[in-house]
Image (cartoon, helix red, strand yellow):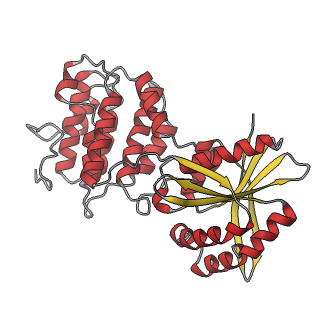
Amino acid sequence: MNFLNAPHPLLPEIDRPYEAADISAFGTERGAAFYETCHLYAQTLWRLGFPARCILLLNRALSCALPAAEPVLQRLPLPYQALAWLMIHRRDDQFIGNPRRHWQHLATRMVEPNKSLRSWRAWACWYLAREILPESAFPPDLKQICTEGVREPTYADIVRHLASLSPADDLERWQAALEWSRAQLGRPEPGPVITRIRRIAADELPVVQELACRIWPQCYPGIISAKQIDYMLTVWYQPDAMAREMELRGVWYALIEAAAHGVVGYLSFERYPDTGTLFINKLYLLQEMHGRGLGAAAMQWAVERAKEMGCQRLQLRVNKANATAIRAYQRFGFAIIEDICTDIGSGFVMDDYRMELALG
């Protein structure tokens, strides 16, 4: 048999090529021997140049609910780092599929036995894929997220569930794989920053305009055209126009500040009269400040202001193609309630979802 790849360094050496029949021979048994054979077959598939199928076999290894004391786990640790290695060392000439979407589907469509454990192991693998693979080339299934209300978990969600469900050392192995992956890619984990959010008066609206002109060209290419970006910035972000919103509709503007970074974002909202709704018109951060808890802090600040105003819900609109923002809002608890498309002039439209968060 002709092998295309050198051995995967985190999978066991093989004494012969393994085949599907080696797995089928176990029937429904999912013990230590099955776990080891999955690794051996995965190594065979990797060496033959089938990384996508190799991933499937390591998924099958993760279907085993082996206890921490099981000797095979000392020789063959839970394969989180082996999966990370596959994604980091993927080859353009060998099909790997879309691991991020694959694990999203697996986590949300898992069946018994050990459904909960296996689902959270799949989410743990999904998180590795999210960290390692560029979203532009390996996008999530946004349609499933929107139509089925799938909520992508946070790091803390995965930690909590692996810690409570695992009979072995899932959490330790997954966190080690995550740390190893970031080191391999030269991506140290960004830490949280101390945040201040403050309401501003009209004299500081030029700061909002300046931030918008930096942020929009970062976040909207590929979602709306450059001409529409320029048009919306011109129409919505003139300080005089924003000042009229404040005067006539009672719109609040606020700046988001981060320790050692200064002003890094902004938000605006207004209370819709007689509806019990606080509507968030704008919430934007500089791209380099994403993933550091600032968006969640700003949203929580808006929630607190809404409650002070006696509102029962928050609403916002988000472009249907803005997958990152949709997922962030869903993690905070928002749900899609409406498709809405609005003509904004000059041949441009806003094709959005309206999302809502009920306030308890």
Question: Residue at 29% of width from left, 32% of height from top?
Answer: 173
Residue at the right extreme of this rendering: 274
Asked if one can make out residue 214 in the rendered structure from this viewpoint, the answer is yes
**In the rendered view, does 33 fall on the left or right side of 270?**
left
- Percent x, y for residue 78? 27, 31
- Percent x, y for residue 63? 36, 29
- Percent x, y for residue 64? 33, 26
Judge by depth and name the residue closer to the eye, 351 or 42.
351
Question: Residue at 36% of width from left, 45% of height from top?
Answer: 128
**In the rendered view, does 239 fall on the left or right side of 88?**
right
Judge by depth and name the residue closer to the eye, 134 or 117.
134
* Image quarter of the C terminus: top right
Question: Residue at 77% of width from left, 45% of height from top?
Answer: 306
**In the rendered view, does 344 fall on the left or right side of 3?**
right
Judge by depth and name the residue closer to the eye, 166 or 28.
166
Judge by depth and name the residue closer to the eye, 124 or 332.
332
Residue at the front extreme of this rendering: 203
Asked if one can make out residue 54 in the rendered structure from this viewpoint, the answer is no
